[in-house]
Image (cartoon, grey):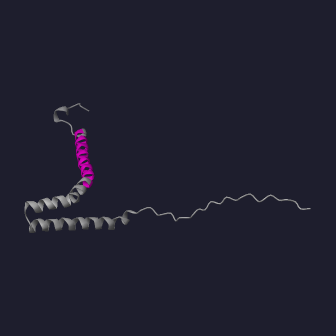
């Protein structure tokens, strides 16, 4: 006697690929990049200065302005935030120093005998 068997249940397998976790970026990894960017910026500005020195004139100024405006505007925008932060920090430190000074300095006319 032959007994009919049901087929085995289908197995579901999910293929996953293992990826190595990327280590977090360290601050010293960005140093070569910024050194390259600032070197490129300095070289570009030196070339612009040489062009303006060698070929003075309205057409040259206009051409240099049209082709290099973003080399000046974008760094100015990027540096505005840190400069404003430092300016505000100095202003607040100056105000805090004045408050500390005013807290401990007393007027001479208020100091008298028995004013303890």
Describe residue 59's horizontal placement relative to residue 87 as left or right: left
Place residue 49 in its image quadrant: bottom left
Residue 6: in magenta span: no
- x, y (%) of residue 100? 25, 42
Instruction: Name the residue rendered at 76%, 59% in the picture.
Output: 8
- x, y (%) of residue 19? 53, 64
Q: Quadrant of the N terminus?
A: bottom right
- x, y (%) of residue 86? 25, 51
Magenta: main secondary structure equals: helix
Instruction: Name the residue rendered at 50%, 63% in the picture.
Output: 21
The residue most toward the top is 114
Q: Nearer the viewer, residue 114 or 53?
A: 53
Place residue 63 in its image quadrant: bottom left
Q: Quadrant of the C terminus?
A: top left
Instruction: Name the residue rendered at 25%, 55% in the picture.
Output: 79
Q: Nearer the viewer, residue 21 or 94?
A: 21
Residue 93: in magenta span: yes
Describe residue 107's horizontal placement relative to residue 1 as left or right: left
Place residue 43 in its image quadrant: bottom left
Describe residue 6's horizontal placement relative to residue 96 as left or right: right
Q: Nearer the viewer, residue 44 or 86?
A: 44
- x, y (%) of residue 68? 20, 60
Residue bounds of the magenta highlight: 78-102
């Amino acid at each position: 006697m032959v007994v009919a068997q049901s087929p085995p249940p289908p197995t579901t397998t999910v293929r996953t690929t293992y990826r190595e976790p990327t280590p977090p970026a360290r601050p010293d990894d960005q140093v070569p990049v910024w050194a390259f960017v600032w070197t490129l910026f300095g070289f570009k500005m030196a070339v612009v200065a040489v062009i303006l020195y060698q070929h003075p004139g309205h057409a040259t100024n206009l051409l240099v302005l049209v082709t290099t405006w973003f080399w000046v505007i974008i760094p100015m925008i990027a540096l505005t935030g840190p400069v404003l932060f430092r300016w505000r920090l100095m202003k607040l430190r100056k105000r805090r120093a004045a408050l500390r000074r005013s807290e401990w300095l007393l007027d001479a006319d208020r100091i008298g005998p028995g004013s303890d």
